Each structure stands twice: as C-alpha cells, then as structure tokens.
Image: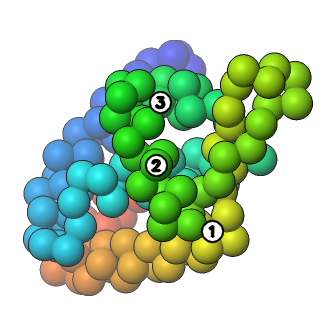
C-alpha cells in the first residue's frame, strides 16, 4: 500500500511539471534554461556543503560538458566556487557561495509569489484538491 501511495505521489508530481512550465516559467521571458539549471544546482548545493560536479550532474540529469559549462558560468557570476576534495585531490567539488545562497533565496521568493498569483484564479475547492 505504501508503494502505491508513492507511485501516485510521483505520478502527480510529474504531471505538475509541464503545467508549472506552461503556466509559470514560460511566461517569464527573463528566465532561460541556463538560469533554471543554475537554480537547480544551487538547490542541490544548499543541502550539502560541497559536491563533485559529476555528482551534481548525475542528480540533475545534466551531461558532463553542459555541467562544466554551467559550473564555469556560475563561478564567473560568483554563485559557486571550486573546492578541492580532501579525500581525493583529483576531484573538484563545487560549493555554494553567500551570493549563491542569496540568489537562491530571492528566486524562491519570486517563484512563491508567482505561484500564488497563478493560484489566485482557482477557487478554494480546487486549491484544496491540490493540497490533498
């Protein structure tokens, strides 16, 4: 039974992704794919102190070449920094900077505000269905 609930929850979340993109992200001409990938990367790094680029790429389904390009852009913007791995000097980790944390917090605030505006067209019954 617990597995059935997990399956339904996963299906419901996956169904929301295209709706979210269609109704929120797509209407914002100022946000592009790289910015979305940056926010996802910052979110992963916010939960851990630092992480190898390959692990971030694996978690976010980002290819190595794109992850390298993304990391270089984020480093240039001061959102993340490279750190050597103490256990393996061949590995380079990425860590979120204070500027990256601030950018992520501001973005979450913006997304929350945008979502609330988009939900304002729904009645209480429809919102209740979304929450169950």
Characterize the local packing of mark 2: few (<14), some (14-19) or many (20 or more) Cα atoms within 10 angstroms: some
Q: Nearer the viewer, residue 8 or 125?
A: 8
Disc 2 to disc 1, C-alpha distance: 17 Å
28 relative position to 77: left or right: left
Q: Which residue is mark 2?
A: 72
Q: Nearer the viewer, residue 23 or 89?
A: 89
Characterize the local packing of mark 1: few (<14), some (14-19) or many (20 or more) Cα atoms within 10 angstroms: some
Estimate the x, y position of residue 114 in percent, counting from the top left.
Answer: 30, 78
94 relative position to 40: left or right: right
Disc 2 to disc 3, C-alpha distance: 14 Å
Estimate the x, y position of residue 37 in percent, counting from the top left.
Answer: 37, 49
Q: Which mark is residue 101?
A: 1
Q: Nearer the viewer, mark 2 or mark 1?
A: 2
Q: Which residue is mark 3?
A: 57
Q: Label 3 near label 2: C-beta < 8 Å?
A: no
Q: Quadrant of residue 65?
A: top left
Q: Earlier in the sequence, mark 2 or mark 3?
A: 3
117 relative position to 88: left or right: left
> Residue at (42%, 55%) from the top-left corner?
73
Estimate the x, y position of residue 21 in percent, counting from the top left.
Answer: 19, 55
């Amino acid at each position: 039974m617990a597995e059935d609930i997990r399956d339904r929850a996963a299906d419901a979340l996956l169904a929301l992704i295209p709706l979210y993109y269609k109704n929120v992200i797509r209407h914002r001409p100022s946000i592009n794919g790289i910015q979305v990938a940056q926010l996802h990367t910052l979110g992963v790094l916010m939960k851990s102190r630092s992480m190898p680029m390959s692990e971030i790429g694996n978690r976010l389904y980002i290819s190595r070449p794109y992850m390298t390009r993304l990391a270089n852009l984020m480093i240039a913007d001061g959102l993340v920094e490279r750190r050597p791995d103490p256990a393996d000097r061949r590995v380079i980790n990425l860590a979120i900077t204070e500027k990256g944390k601030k950018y992520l917090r501001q973005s979450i605030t913006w997304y929350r505000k945008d979502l609330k505006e988009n939900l304002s067209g729904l009645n209480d019954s429809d919102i209740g269905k979304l929450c169950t």
